[in-house]
Structure formats: C-alpha cells, structure tokens
Image: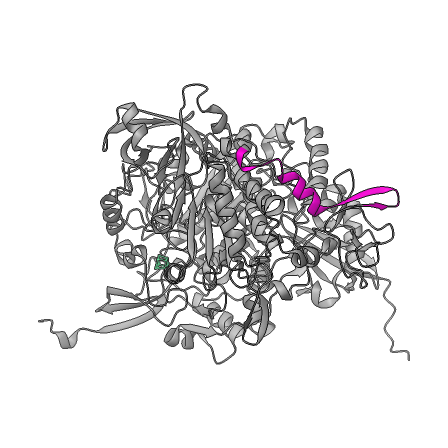
Amino acid sequence: MNLTPAVQANVAVRVTFMGGLHAVTGQRELQMTFPQGATVADLLASLSKRYGDAFTCRVFSSPGKLEHTILIFVDGEHIKGRGGLAATLGNSEVEVIMLPMYAGG
Amino acid sequence: MEMTQSNLSSKEIITACGMCYVGCGVKVQVDNGVVVNIEGNPDNPQNRGKMCAKGKAVFMTHYNPNRVKAPMKRTNPEKGYGVDPGWVEITWDEAIDTIVAQLERIRDKPSKFWVYAWEVIGDNNFWFPQLGIAFGSPHCGVATSPTCGKAIHPVEFFSGGGFHQAPDLHYSNYCILVGTQFGVASRSSFNHNVLDMAEARSRGMKLVVIDPVGGHAASKADEWIPIRPGTDTALANSMLHVLLNELHIYDEPFLKHRTNAAYLVGQDGLYIRDAATNEPQIHDARDGKVKTHNDPSLTDPSLSGTYDVHGQQGRTCFDLLREHVAKYSPETTEKITTIPAATVRRITREFGEAARVGETICIDGVDLPLRPASVDWARGTQGHKHGFHNCWPLKLVNIVVGAVNVPGGILSTGAAGDFPHHWWPEGGTDGMLEHGGAIMHGFSHAKAFPGRAPATPNRMDIGELFPLASHFQTLLPITLENPPAYGLSEEDKIEVLLHSPTNPVLGSWGDPKKVEKLLTSLRFIFGFAVEINEMTLFDDIVLPFPSSLERYDFNCGTAQNNLGPCGQDDFCWTVRQPAIEAVTSIRHPQEVIQEIAERLGILDGLYRLLNHTYGLKKEYALQSGTRYRVTEFIDRAVRSWFGEEHSLDWFREHNVLRHPKSVDVAYINPFLKARIPVYLEHFVTKGKQLKAVVDQLGLDWDLSDYQPLSDWRPCQSYDAMGKGEYDLIAVHFKLPYVYGSYGNENPWIDEVCEATDAYKILLNAAVGKAKGIANGDSVWLQSPVHKVRATVKLTECIHPQVVGIGGHFGHFAPGMPISRGKGISFNALLPTDLDHIDKISTALDHCVQVKVYK
Ligand code: SF4
C-alpha cells in the first residue's frame, strides 16, 4: 500500500488586510489559491494585479522593496524571519498590514 | 477611634511621574491611602532626583474634585461650543455596548473609524492605534500638534538616525538654539537636560538663543538674538554661506565619505546614475574615474568640480550647495530676518571655530571626532508655511562641520542601543541613511526618505498627497470642507472617533469654527477623559482615565523610548505602577481596549500588532483567546525584554533598570554604514510624481518646496505686515510649567501661571507705548479668523514686530472651573486652510498676522 500522501496541486491562503489596506482592497479578508511553492512575492504580485496601482504604490517603495509601513505575517510569523518576500506559503494565514505613521509631535 | 501616629499606614512607592511624556522617576509617599508627598528618584537618570513644578503638582490633578470617575453618556444630541451635553453616568456595560454597536455599524467601511491616540505618557499611545489598525482603519495616529514634530522627526531619521535631536551638552562649547528652549524650558527629558545645560554653562559653554521671544531660554543665554518669525531658512543659508564660501570652514573628510556631498548631479537636478546598477556616482580624485558610491576602489571622492559622465556634465552636490547659499549673504538676509549682517558673521565664525574641525577625542579607548558646537531647533522653526525648509538648512549647518552624532555635536535621540536588544540605524536606497533606529521595533516612525508614492487619496486626511510628511491629522478640518476636491466622496467621511484624554480642540488645529465643524460632523465620539475639557464636550460616551498615580504602564513615556538621555548617560527603563488604587469604576484602558476588540472579533489582530510593536518573544506573546489584566501584560513585557529575573515584581520593588552605554551607541556616526544628505535629490522626483497626481485631481498647488536645496519663502503673515490692517505677527512659546493644556486645571500650576504673568500676552514696550497701551491693559487681539480679549504685559524682551503668547490656555469648558477664562488659546488665531499648510510636512503656519487695540 502506498502511504505517500497525494501531491497537493495548490495551497489555500487566507489573506487578512489590516490598517489602511482595507480602504484599497475594500475587503477585510480574501481566500486565494496558489500552486505549491508559491511565495509572498507571488501573493503580492497577484494582489497587485487584482487591485492595481492603488495597491502596488502603497505596498512597494520600489519594485521588490516593501514600503516601510507594510508588515506581513505568515502563520503568525513576520516574514523577516522566513526569508522576506521569498517566504513560501503553505496552507497559510497571511496578514498584510499597513501601519499608519506613528511618530508623534 | 482616635487616630494616632502609630496606626497610620505609611508607604513609599517608586514609580514614574505622568504629568508629561518625560516620565521622571519619582518616590511617592502615601499615608493612610492618601498621597502626601512626591520626590524625584535620584537613581533614575531621566531626572537624577529632580522634578519640575508640573510633577510636584501631580496630586492636585489626581485629587481634582471634578475628575471623571465613571463612564458617562451625553443626553443632549446637539453638539457645539457652549452646548451642555447633559451628562449622565452609565455602567461600563452600557458604555461598551454602545461603542461596539457604533463600530459594528461601520464594520464594512472601517476607514470611517478615526483613532486619535496621542497619549505619550504611557502604553495607550500604542494600544489605542492598534485597535484602529486591527479594525482596518488608515486613520490612526499618535501625533497631535499642527506643528511639533512635523519636520524634526523626518529630518532626524534621514540625517541622524533617531527620533529627535539634542545638543551633546557633555562636550559642547558653543550651542545655538533657534526657536527652541532646549535644556531650559521645553522638550523632553528636561530635568536632566536642565542639569546638563547648567553644568555646560558653568564650565564656559556659550549659549546663543535666536528667537522672536526673549523668554526662559534667552534669560539663561549669553546672547539673545531676536529674529523675525518664519525667516530661519534665510538665517541658516547665510550661516552656510559664511562657513562654506567666506570662512571655508567645513569637515572635508566627513563630507566626502559620510554624506552625499560628492554625488554627481546632472542638469535635471537628479543624480547621475550608473547604467548597470542605477547607483549614484562619484568622481574619484585618486584615479580620475567616475564610479558608484559603493565601489570598493573609491578612495578620494571629489567634493568640487564638473565631470563628464558619458556626455552628461555632472556637478557635485557640495558645489551646488555652496553656489545655492551664495545667494544668501548676511547683508541680503538682514532685510528678511532683521538680524544684523555683522551678528550673523560673528556667531557663524564663533560656531565654526568652536567646532574644531579635524580634532579628535579619545573616550573609553576609542578615538572619535570632536565637534563641540551645535545648532539646535525645534517647534518654533517648524510651524510655518514652508516649515520643512525653515528647519532643514539649520541641520545642515551642523552637517557641514561634521558635528552630527559625535562628541560635542548634535546627537540623535534613541537612535541606537545594545540593551535589552540591539537596534541601529541602517542605510538603504542610494547608500543613504534610510532606516532609523528605534527601541520599539514595531514603531512605524516618520520618514521623509525615500518617501512614498503619491496617489489619489482614499484617506480623509489626504495623506497620499504628502509623500514626505510624517502625519496628516492637521488636514482634517480642511479636507472635510470639500472631499470631492481631493477625489473623495461623502461616503468616505469619518464617522466614529476614539480619542485619548488630551485636548485637541485647543492644541491640534487652528480656526475654532473649523474645528467645531469637524467635530460636529462626526456621528459618534468616544473618548477617555481625566476632566471634562473642550474636547470631551463633543463626546457621546466619556470613559474615565486613571491618573498617573493609579496607573500601570510598561512604557512610561515617549522620553523613555525615543528621547532618552544623550551621550553616555545610562540607558534606563522604568515601569509606572500605582501609588494608590483607583476607585473600582475606573478601569485600565488596555483592558477596555481588549474587551472592545474581543466583542468586535478582532482580538487576535490586536494581539498580532501588540506582539510586534512591543517585540514580545514567542513565549511571552499575547495568546489568541485570552484576555489579560494590565499587570499580566506588563509582567510578560518586562520578562520578555529583560529576562525572567526582571518580572513586574522586580520593577515594583526596584523600579529602575539601568545599563551603561558603549561609545558606539552614544556616538553613532563614525560607526554608521550609511551616508547622510546635504542635497535632497529625492525631493525632485517626489515633486514631479506629486505634480502628476495633483494635476489629475485638478488641484492648483504650489509645489516649489519640492526642491533639493532650501530657499526662503515668506509666510502669509510676512507679506501681510504693513500692507493692510495688520501690523504684528503673533507667535507661540512654551512655558516650563505647562505641558500642552494638560495640567492647566491644576490649582498649583494655575498659581504659578498667575504669579509669572503666563496668562498675559507679550508686547514690545516701545510698540505698546506707540499704541498707547500700558502694562496690564486689556486689549483686543485680532487675527484674520479670531478676535479675543487679552491682557498685555509690556517687555523689552520681544521682537518689536511680534506678539508672544505662551501656553495652551483659553479654556471655556464648564468642567474646568480653575482654568476657565484665563489666558488665550493661541491656536484659535490661526487661519486653517491649504494656503497655510506646508506642502512638505503638513505643518500649519504658526505665525499669524494680528492687530492689538483697546
Ligand atoms: S518633567 Fe514631566 S515627568 Fe518630569 S517631573 Fe516634570 S512633569 Fe513629571
């Protein structure tokens, strides 16, 4: 009997938007599927396509470089600790957060 | 029963003062449950045992009989100045049910929620905005002032690496203060700064104060130089001209290797970039080749000259700066600033010589550049129509002599540290300093480099049209008037506001009619309150806020995390703990926020944000599905940061944790792997991008401030002088015993204000005489938007074209019987429209034309 699990073609990703991104996406949550091995960069590329320039210009300061106010967590862990935009997505919960400026005066 | 001395219970609690954001260490004496005395804690480096008048008066605020002690709701739906809300006390359940119902109503349009979180005295500065972010709102911030912080933080993060700046009084021999009373009467940590300032002066440091008002700082200075408001760009450019073109005093190695002074710029004002890497280029005098700024073979960057780069003529940033400031000879700017040319030349020479360019000092075995001279500036220079450029060239005066983050120079506060974790500013785009350092890693600080992409707004404060600014709340009363003008619709309007226990009505905007319109446009306001002030009058639900004597805070003030002592003074961490228990109807706001978040189903999101902001290690992180008492949260935070042995109980007993600073943490510049700017190339790009967006929106905005080098441009008040009915300019100044409007209702502070004439407006004696106005006369003070009765104090110590107004007074709320009707609200005089807003920083112009008459 073959006990190897069937190869999964896709991963299911639940994306949550917090902070200012809701105003861009109009959604608090989104269910997406990606081929196995997809990364956070792929997820953002897909979101950029879906939501257009309004999303891209708020999330990236230059191509491939996240705006300093953007935080991304995959399964509760900051992507910094998982290889940044190259972090791979499993069947993941992804939070994309746009922090407002904090510093006071 | 007869009470005897022996059955009185007496205890001393070590904690942190909460009458301003400095968070000085204090010892509170509590006899039989009553606070009877408060002293400075000598073990706390923030204040070394000293206290200011505000802190000493704290228990009069705590025992204010008019304090809010239970939730209340308004019964009168009508809102406005002078309208009685008809408060009735309600239960916490009713209050939270109402709040949650209002937030549920806008759940699908979360940008209708606005969190106004300025509570820089404690943790709620972080907790309040996180609720808004978890809810999905872009309108969350902790900034409050329409001026303060608008330029200093953006400038400091890209040119120093930290949140704020402070002269290194331990080594300084020459200190110029422009529009600030640092070390005397304002700014963070002033208990230790006051001591350092006194020591520096007694060992011979020369203090020069340049300010329209000869106030507290000027009274301690060797020299007070009155300046016409809003002309600091002209002064700074003159000083740069004298240093660079007349005296030739500048730090050549520093400029070559640690700034972009040698970067080559083309005709279009942009860097000439390497075709392959897109990196800016530099001419290397050693081999005559042009190479990228990060080329390992780069040895001797050319500061001057014109170089051919693939057919493009490249000039150095340094040459462009020198040429630019040559337009600002002291004779030219004398007509603008009213400072005699000879004075500018003299103080610039004194400053340049005091900087001792080229000298070094050995500290703890490490050789460092010694530059014992600095120019410091703060609020006064920021509050102008061209506020950013009014400030930036003042920082450049320090940069050209290499007096940045080295002994004796201007230091960045909170920029770097190695305890309890490592934080450090880092380079990024174009090899320039991009990522400022902050002990709170999750703190999203103000950044003006490289700036954001301008876009059609979806924020009601049109933050997208200010790609270099750090906060935008000042714009709300303006944008509200015509949302479609900015591509917004009525649908986008904010409906629900949560505010901290501060007083934005008096302190956050200008024209009171527009402020009233903004607040009455909101459908539901809930806020925390200590007393019923002018802001609270607009609330639908008021929640009681614990006083600083009955509160816990892990983070007991902005000064602790961002504005701590400079130089090699010890790092310290203090936890605020209650000296006395609050009545049961007062709840810790952190616990209230958790309850609201749980009811809204966003508690996990809130925890994600808090865990990140506080940098809580995995084992101490707030866990899904659990609610925490404030003490449990603080216990987790201190153990996460300082180790198991430093629990909340440890802090309850010892309260202060100190750690010595190493030389590299105290003086970061020689160790920084990034350059700082003398030329703001990205302003050119951002200006072009912004122009495309505003053109598309059909807005006719003057974007000339998006230029890489600073030019002086007049504020409206400058042009108004002498042209029509106004002949004076009103400016605001700070008092050492007044922190915003916080504490104005304290009877002891009121007494100090009365005794020092703080409620009066200052007018030059000769001007008063010419107008037939005598000391103590009651007059009308009138600006283009507001007219108010004021009492005059005549003085020699004010620029003859200026009216000086101190503090944040002019209360009218019935809940403030002590301060009501005393002094005036300066902000109320300020026209509030886009013509008075700095298009770079969003600062609201704080010099306003006025007339004074009987
Ligand atoms: S400076 Fe601030 S924290 Fe320190 S004693 Fe005065 S009010 Fe309290």
Q: Is residue B342 magenta?
A: no
Q: Is residue B664 left or right of residue B99?
A: right
Q: Is residue B30 left or right of residue A7?
A: left
- Decide if residue B49 is in sight here: yes
From this view, report whether residue B153 is shown above or below residue B323. below
Farthest right residue?
A1
Q: Quadrant of ligand 1?
A: bottom left
Q: What's the magenta region?
A: B307-331
Viewer-nearest residue: B112 or B247: B247
Total label count? 0
From this view, report whether residue B84 is shown above or below residue B417. above
Q: Position of residue A74 (x, y in %)?
A: 70, 63
- Residue that appears at 79% across and 62% down: A86
Q: Position of residue B680 (x, y in %)?
A: 67, 45
Q: Is residue B576 left or right of residue B117?
A: left
Res A41 → quadrant:
bottom right
Res B490 → quadrant:
top right
Viewer-nearest residue: B123 or B163: B163
Viewer-nearest residue: B446 or B811: B446
- Residue that appears at 43% across and 62% down: B556
Q: Is residue B317 magenta?
A: yes
Viewer-nearest residue: B1 or B338: B338
- Classify the position of the N terminus of chain B by image quarter: bottom left
